Image (tube, grey):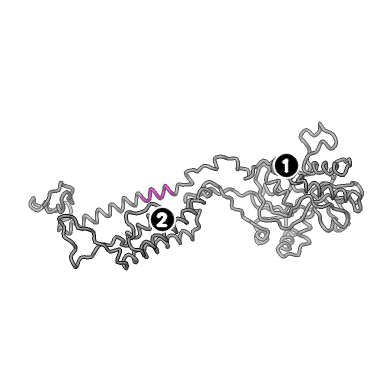
Amino acid sequence: MEGPYVMLKKNSELYEGNDQFEGYCVDLASEIAKHIGIKYKISIVPDGKYGARDPETKIWNGMVGELVYGKAEIAVAPLTITLVREEVIDFSKPFMSLGISIMIKKPQKSKPGVFSFLDPLAYEIWMCIVFAYIGVSVVLFLVSRFSPYEWHAEEPEEGTTELGPTDQPPNEFGIFNSLWFSLGAFMQQGCDISPRSLSGRIVGGVWWFFTLIIISSYTANLAAFLTVERMVSPIESAEDLAKQTEIAYGTLDSGSTKEFFRRSKIAVYEKMWSYMKSAEPTVFTKTTMEGVARVRKSKGKYAFLLESTMNEYTEQRKPCDTMKVGGNLDSKGYGIATPKGSQLRNAVNLAVLKLNEQGLLDKLKNKWWYDKGECGSGGGDSKDKSSQALSLSNVAGVFYILVGGLGLAMLVALVEFCYKSRAEAKRMKVDLSPPHCPSPSPSTQNLATYREGYNVYGSEGVKI
């Protein structure tokens, strides 16, 4: 008896017979009985196994044994169709397709870091953008130097003279202005200067197109990277399991999954079987629920190999701490079993095909797997509305950059002031000696003023 296939109802003691049970296989058995016109009684296998043959005694156990030895007439259960079973019993057409899958404990979600706003683009892309920015600025600078259309003389103001033959007309695109123009375009802010020459405008145009695509791609991915807490799985496939030694893995001690690995000739699966049969303590479990419990208690150090259907069902049940990783290792199906040569086989086959065509099989699976799920479509935390809101930790890096930029600007402003003051003082031959030196005479004090309204010492300026 195993959910969601066959389970006891709540307060099952208040019911009798078949009414005590519920589940996918209970509903399927009811539909099959309606189509072939039979009455039935649900019985639970005493040993709780699906069915395997003992290699020494050659005796079958579980549901297969019940059919082989005439103790049951039909088995409606998640019974995998295999060659060894088909030799002793008959199967209907598959009513469900599946494969062997890997179950692990769901890893802790990694919260976005301080600089997670950089995550939408890979590190290599950011580096390429930096080099592209520098390259475009240099090319724009060179193009502006070569093109005669970037050299232009401004109209002289009243009271000024025109440029002499030895004077050079100004060019706005020096190296710093080129860097500023490229940065403004990348930040979508524009600039107070623009190329005049055709070659310069071509450089600007392709840079604008480049930034348009980059910014659009970045913006499209930014929200997902900031609001979604991502899980990093330690393994992604059977190959990952086979190559590592930290995570133990096993399967059901009696069933088709164990037989699959025992008989497989694929190198990866042979390696996995060699590990499983020799592992100490044993990695096999007596029941599926025991394997699931072992995964939950292992703190990520045990992986359970089981049918994908059961894996998907468990993933949708509280405490929502398991997950399926990778694809299926094989492809197989569940079938309804009858004793060899039973007259019920053809009728059951037709009933399964009819239910499949009517879409009832898919409807039953959705009912018991997802409609009754306890974790939501996105897992156990999908209902947490707070996960959709940005927190300070998501964007703290932006504030750090802002504060750092403001601090850098203040520092640069101080350096500029000191440098310019010293340069102008030297030009005006002003004595910048320490305070203990004799103060300048009144006749020379006015030399500190070199421009109307500006004084190095901060005193009121006068025009010389």
Q: Closer to the N terminus: mark 1 or mark 2?
A: 2
Callout 1–callout 2 Cβ contact below 8 Å: no
Identify the element where label 2 is drawn.
Answer: helix
* Residue 409 in picture, x, y percent from top left: 33, 51
Q: Is residue 260 above or below residue 75?
A: below
* Residue 197 in picture, x, y percent from top left: 33, 63
Q: Is residue 129 above or below residue 383?
A: below
Task: Report which residue position mark 2 lands on.
Answer: 186
Question: Which quadrant of the structure image shows residue 281?
Answer: bottom right
* Residue 106 in picture, x, y percent from top left: 63, 49
Residue pictured at 82% horizontal, 36% vertical: 19
- The answer to whether residue 320 is visible is yes
* Residue 94 in picture, x, y percent from top left: 80, 52
Q: Residues within 10 Å of mark 1 (few under 14, many from 20)?
A: some
Q: Is residue 404 left or right of residue 392?
A: left
Three-letter amino acid code of the residue under disc 1? Lys
Three-letter amino acid code of the residue under disc 2? Phe
Residue pictured at 66% horizontal, 48% vertical: 322
Residue 136 in the magenta stretch? The answer is no
Most foreground residue, 164 or 266: 164
Identify the element where label 1 is drawn.
Answer: helix
Task: Report which residue position mark 1 lands on.
Answer: 367
Segment tinted magenta in the rendering: 398-405
Q: Which mark is residue 101?
A: none
Q: Is residue 387 left or right of residue 70?
A: left
